[in-house]
Amino acid sequence: MKKFLEEFKQFALKGNVMDLAVGVIIGAAFQNIVTALTADFITPLIAAVTGSTAEDGTVSIGGTFTINGAVFNYGDFISSIINFLIMAFILFLIIKAVNKLMNVGKKKQAPGAPTTKVCPFCKSTIDIEATKCPHCTSDLPAKEEEEKAKA
């Protein structure tokens, strides 16, 4: 059971899974708020500036046009675009905050610090943290021994 919980924790805390979960949950939670904000504040504000109201007294952005009996309500489309932009901005801020929290406590590498070294046996480039050369399979000397050899 303990191993199962560890595996689940590792799966659940992967970056893409967390981003997706936050996006779905927050998107669902804020959908009504954003729709109300757009319908009750932004649309009337735009209508007040442009002076457009429907015949029944309701406020709409733009309006509609008809082609061969088909009614195209481009005002609703513009409202949907505004909803999308607001939701995308909110999700961007939340994902940015989650990513920042995930990086708290992670050790940062000093800028300009080397990330590779040369194997003393085969002279190939290897990762700085390597203890065995992947090319010649030689056991590499510890950092202390390397520093003594250079001095």
Image (tube, rainbow, N blue to C red):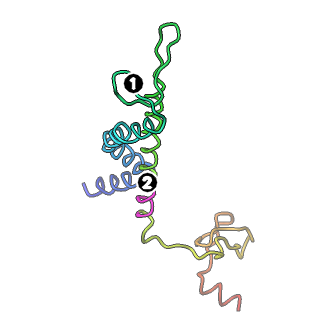
User: Which residues are drawn in magenta?
Assistant: 94-101
Density class for disc 1 (Cα within 10 Å; few <14, some 14-19, many ≥20) is few
| Horizontal and vertical percent position of residue 93 | 44, 55
Q: Quadrant of residue 111?
A: bottom right
In this view, 99 is above or below 120: above
Q: Earlier in the sequence, mark 2 or mark 1?
A: 1
Q: What number is the disc on residue 54?
A: 1
Q: Quadrant of the N terminus?
A: bottom left
Residue in front for this viewpoint, 67 or 44: 44
Q: Residue furthest left?
A: 1
Callout 1: helix, strand or loop? loop
* Left or right relative to 129: residue 9: left
Callout 2: helix, strand or loop? helix
Residue located at (47% from left, 39% from top): 49
Q: What number is the disc on residue 95?
A: 2
Q: Does the segment drawn in magenta span residue 97? A: yes
Residue located at (36% from left, 52% from top): 12
In this view, 33 is above or below 72: below
Q: What number is the disc on residue 14?
A: none
